[in-house]
Image (cartoon, helix red, strand yellow):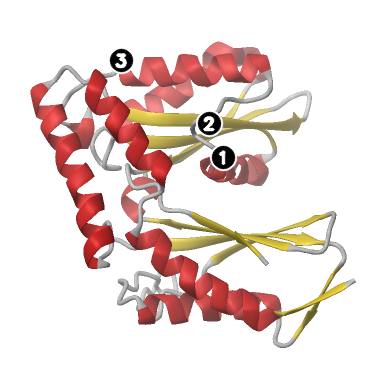
Amino acid sequence: MRTVATTLIRDKIADMSIIANIEAQPFVTDAFEMSLKRESNPVARRILGQLIDNYRIAREQHLPICQDTGCVAVYLEIGQDVHFTGAPVEQMVHEGIRIGYDKGYLRKSMVKDPILRGNTGDNTPGMVHYTIVQGDTVRISVLPKGAGCESMSKIAMLKPADGIDGIKKFVIDTIRTAGGNPCPPLFIGVGIGGSFEKVASLAKEALLLPFDESSCLPHVAELEAQLLEEINNLQVGPQGLGGDTTALGLRVLTYPTHIAALPVAVNISCHALRRETAVI
């Protein structure tokens, strides 16, 4: 048994909230550089170059990559041999977000009530997800998502008879309908299976996967490659102005489901897939 003070979680999330919003992950900038070499549309090439410059300026000047610093999803993979001390874990998660967004001068975007609105003033609460795993460590992942891309995400309860063609049609139609609204080029998470609430979680969790890898399941890896190719063939392009680069990456997560169900969800991230992971 290992004892972990929940203040460690608070402090780590505060730092991660700032870093995720100002420093693009290497896989993001690498994907841009690769796309720039392949892109044939002059306007799209110019936009890709400007976005690369934006990442550099944000990092060098310690500024947010985007003015919409998002709603923060926090994923905690908690080892079953961990014993927490101090204030409740979830309270410390929200406190970490509050501290990070205040210290980092990040925009506060959360409202108190979805109908009555009214800004909470500190970008809390976050969306907290827990998984209990083996071991005595806590793995924390922070994923801030802006509303432009989050609002274009979709879920569908397809029929099993719709099969792989139905899945592909839904995913591609979702990206086609989104157009330039989610600030492409995109990173896309797709969930397949589970139930109504589970498939939405799968789609967002897929955005935490490595985007320089493919699924270990051959049929899913094939689907990932096909979807990415067909989405880029849509010619939506960077910022919706046309081009070969509508998406920089796509990952799929699957889960067992009911014999009469085929849930599918698409969680869209803008070009700035902001995420940070740490282990304590």
Q: Is residue 110 left or right of residue 198?
A: left
Identified by mark 2, the residue type is Arg
Q: Are marks 1 and 2 in contact (CB under 8 Å)?
A: yes
Identified by mark 1, the residue type is Leu
Q: Are marks 3 and 1 in contact (CB under 8 Å)?
A: no
Q: Residue 249's x, y, as percent?
A: 43, 30
- Residue corresponding to mark 1: 209
- Residue corresponding to mark 2: 251
* Residue positioned 65% across, 75% down in the render: 90
Relative to 60, does residue 172 appear above or below in the rendering?
above
Q: Nearer the viewer, residue 234 or 209?
A: 209
Q: Is residue 70 left or right of residue 41?
A: right
CA gap, disc 2 and disc 3: 17 Å
Q: Nearer the viewer, mark 1 or mark 2?
A: 1
Q: Residue 133's x, y, as percent?
A: 81, 54
* Farthest-out residue, right: 1
Secondary structure under the numbered disc 2 in the rendered image: strand
Mark 3: few, some, or many residues within 10 Å (few <14, many ≥20)?
A: some
* Farthest-out residue, front: 60
Identified by mark 3, the residue type is Asn
Relative to 18, does residue 207 appear above or below in the rendering?
above
Secondary structure under the numbered disc 3 in the rendered image: loop
* Residue positioned 27% across, 57% down in the render: 65
Mark 3 or mark 1: whose residue is earlier in sequence = 1
| Circle number at residue 233 | 3
Mark 2: few, some, or many residues within 10 Å (few <14, many ≥20)?
A: many
